Amino acid sequence: MTHPDWECSAVIDQMFFFLDSELVDADRDEIERHLADCGPCLAKYDLERTVKSLVQRSCCETAPDGLRDRVLLSIRQVQVRISED
Ligand SMILES: [Zn+2]
C-alpha cells in the first residue's frame, strides 16, 4: 500500500466535515486521495456516509442504537459477500 500523505487519524477527524461538504477544496482533494489509497479509511468513510444518509432519511439527530447496529451488520454482510467473490 502506498503511504498516504495524511495520517489516518487526521482523515478520520476531518471525515465528518468532508461528509458535510464543509472543507475547502484543497482539504477535500487530500482526503479523496487518501481514501483512494487507504482501504480502512475508505471502509470507514462508506460506513459513515451510509449511516448519515439513513439518519437524514429518518429525520433524526442521531441514529438509534438499534438502527446503527443493523446498518453495521448489513454492511459487514455486504463486505463478506464482496470478499467471497
Ligand atoms: Zn487511512
Image (spheres, grey):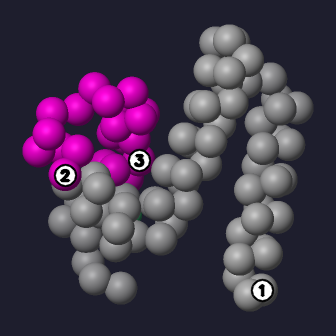
Q: Position of residue 47 (x, y in %)?
A: 61, 49
Disc 3 CB within 8 Å of nearest ligand 1 atom:
yes
Nearest the camera: 61 or 7?
61
Q: What stretch is highlighted in magenta?
A: 9-29
Residue 16 included in the magenta stretch of the image: yes
Q: In the displayed structure, does residue 70 sit left or right of residue 45?
A: right
Is residue 8 in view?
yes
Identify the element where label 1 is drawn. helix
Residue annotated with mark 1: 84
Nearest the camera: 15 or 84?
84
Q: Main secondary structure of the magenta part?
A: helix
Q: Nearer the viewer, mark 3 or mark 1?
A: 1
At 30% across and 63% down in the image, what residue appears? 34
Q: Where is residue 37 in the image (x, y as percent from the top left)?
A: 34, 73
Q: In the displayed structure, does residue 32 sit left or right of residue 19?
A: left
Residue annotated with mark 3: 12
Q: Tell me if residue 66 comes above or below residue 44 in the rendering.
A: above
Q: Which mark is residue 29?
A: 2
The tag earlier along the polypeptide, 3 or 2, is: 3
For the residues labelled 3 and 2, the Cα–Cα distance comes to 14 Å
Is residue 7 in view?
no
